[in-house]
Amino acid sequence: DTDPVLSALADGVLRLTLNRPDKLNAFNEAMHRALRAGFERAHADENVRAVLLTGAGRGFSAGQDLGDRDPRKGGPVDLGHTIDTLYNPLLRLIRSLEKPVVCAVNGVAAGAGANIAFACDITLAARSARFVQAFAKIGLVPDSGGTWSLPHLVGEARAKGLALTGEPLDAETAANWGLIWRVVDDAALMEEAFALAVRLATGPTKGLGTTKRAIQAAASNTFDEQLELERDLQREAGFSADYAEGVAAFLEKRKPEFKGR
Ligand code: T3D
């Protein structure tokens, strides 16, 4: 299949597979547009209750396709413009989606590829995967939220170590440092990631989405502001059908059937 992103909806999970394996799923404009369309669908379609993002072939994503930036073929491109029109809208769609986004990093994740993985809600990585802040090697600044995610997730010392050296970080260390949720044996990655996504997709989607919003808001809130946000969001959650179902199922000692509302 030559579509730059493969898209499949099953069991409430929209699986989006970056599909330029010959280029380690590096981003060109077509892949950007297709991935963005996938996340826009996830926002709009109530049958989508979780997203699973992964890559085809041996890599997750090598970030920007540098073939499209060949200085021998033309003058410099305004990268501020491509960040504004391609990368930033994608990252905003991932973060603002009030549904869980699971990322299965099946192989190397470099440049924007790494930082997109760190922006997802629950990121699993194959044991053989590695993360590279490749920007350091070509004179660029980490983008796709990297300069925000890295210090928030691992602190300034490790963030600078990664971003200034561009040294690859193995999946096990990434998990130990708190950059990702968990490492999985290569052969088990997709099965485990899909099972997790299905579990989330059959959960109380509205409550999970609100939880995501609350945790993300903590980065810029004081403790007191966060307490007030929790009050407001709990009020909202308390009126949801899924909350009523969750409590009823608990009291009736049965499995809840969440509708995502
Ligand atoms: O430009 C803007 O709009 C601003 C936004 C920037 C965002 C960014 O992401 S900037 C960072 C761009 N990415 C990189 O600098 C990473 C470049 N790639 C690598 O450093 C290495 O390929 C990897 C560390 C990712 C993997 O290394 P390895 O040894 O496993 O694989 P390889 O042999 O280097 O690559 C395999 C093939 O993929 C190879 O093609 P070939 O020779 O088999 O035909 C290689 O050229 C191609 N490839 C890998 N990365 C890219 C790429 N082709 C185009 N663009 C790439 N980024």
Image (cartoon, rainbow, N blue to C red):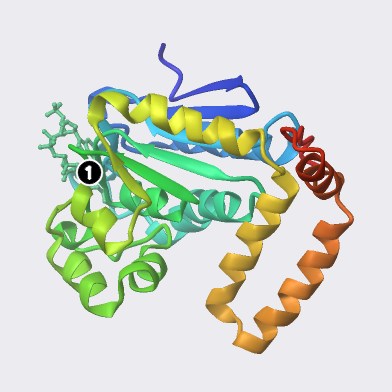
According to the image, label 1 marks what residue?
A: 70
Q: Quadrant of residue 234?
A: bottom right
Tell me the quadrant of ligand 1: top left
Q: Is mark 1 within 8 Å of ligand 1?
A: no
Report how many numbered discs are placed on residues in the image: 1
Residue 172 appearing in the image? yes
Q: Name the residue type under label 1.
A: Asp
**Image point 87% across, 45% down: which residue?**
241
Residue 57 at x, y percent in the picture: 27, 23
The one of 21 and 15 positioned closer to us in this rendering: 15
**Image point 57% across, 55% down: which residue?**
95
The one of 257 and 92 positioned closer to us in this rendering: 257
Horizontal arrangement in the rendering, residue 251 relative to residue 68 (left or right): right
Look at the numbered disc 1 and give the secondary structure of its residue. Answer: loop
Residue 3 at x, y percent in the picture: 46, 19
Horizontal arrangement in the rendering, residue 121 relative to residue 42 (left or right): left
The one of 14 and 194 positioned closer to us in this rendering: 194
Q: Quadrant of residue 55?
A: top left
Placement of 253 over or under 76, stated as above or below: above
**Image point 57% across, 79% down: which residue?**
220
Q: Quadrant of residue 261?
A: top right
Residue 33 appearing in the image? no
